[in-house]
């Protein structure tokens, strides 16, 4: 079994519509997830405010 | 995952806004042959609902993950575990 180097701990809550707010342990500023662009069109939702989607974050994080 | 779960819960009229629903998440990052790798993500949902809604919530739990784009994007690479705790109203 491999050695655990770090455990990421995050609490996520929901705001209005598709907006979710993530609090990552060790950081005071939250991260917002939502919908926009093609993802918004796909789901046919009209959010009050647009945020980057979870998939954007995955793409960015893998690429960073 | 949480957003998709919420949308499936909504089909059963279960409300999940603000303080009614949260996910406590852990992700283990392991040393696999000298490379740091996310090996498991554990998502523990805490959902406020009435006793009468519990069966619908269990049904949603069993039927949402295949609809989740993020989970489906990493399935096969990262083990995903999820659990559900009820917080009775």
Image (tube, coloured by chain):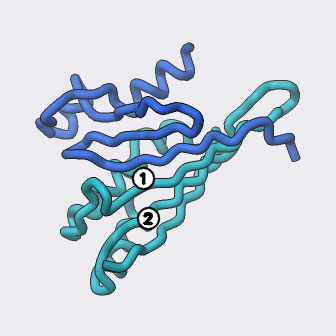
Mark 1 is surrounded, within 10 Å at the Cα level, by few (under 14), some (14 to 19) or many (20 or more) other residues, namely few
Colour chain A appears in: blue
Q: Is residue B74 left or right of residue B79?
A: left
Q: Of all residues shown, which one is farthest toward the front?
A: A28
| Rendering coords of residue B77 (x, y %) | 64, 39
Same chain for mark 1 and mark 2? The answer is: yes
For the colour cyan, the matching chain is: B
- Mark drawn on residue B66: 1
Q: Residue at x 25, y 56 (%)?
A: B17
Q: Residues within 10 Å of mark 2 (few under 14, many from 20)?
A: some
> Closest to the observer: A11 or B36?
A11
What's the residue at 24%, 68% (across, down)?
Answer: B14
Percent of width and height locating residue A36: 23, 27
**Residue at 51%, 54% in the rendered image:** B24
* Residue found at x 73% / y 37%: A6
**Where residue A29 sits in the image (x, y, percent)?**
43, 30
**SS class, disc 1:** helix
- In contact (CB < 8 Å): disc 1 and disc 2: no
Q: Quadrant of the C terminus of chain A?
A: top right
Q: Which mark is residue B43?
A: none
* Discs 1/2, front: 2
Q: Quadrant of residue A53?
A: top left
Q: CA distance from mark 1 to mark 2?
A: 20 Å
- Which residue matches tag 2? B46
Looking at this view, is A31 or B42 the one in front?
A31
Q: Earlier in the sequence, mark 1 or mark 2?
A: 2
């Amino acid at each position: 079994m491999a050695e655990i180097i770090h455990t990421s701990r995050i609490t996520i809550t929901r705001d209005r519509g598709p907006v979710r707010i993530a609090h990552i342990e060790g950081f005071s500023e939250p991260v917002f997830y939502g919908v926009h662009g093609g993802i918004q069109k796909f789901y046919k939702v009209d959010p009050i405010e647009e945020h980057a989607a979870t998939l954007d974050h995955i793409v960015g994080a893998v690429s960073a | 995952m949480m957003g998709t779960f919420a949308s499936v819960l909504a089909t059963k009229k279960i409300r999940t806004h603000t303080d009614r629903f949260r996910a406590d998440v852990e992700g283990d990052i392991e040393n696999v042959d000298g490379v740091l790798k996310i090996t498991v993500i554990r998502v523990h949902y805490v959902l406020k609902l009435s006793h009468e809604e519990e069966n619908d919530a269990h049904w949603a739990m069993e039927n949402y993950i295949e609809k989740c784009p993020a989970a489906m994007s990493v399935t096969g690479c990262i083990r995903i575990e999820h659990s559900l705790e009820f917080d009775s109203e």
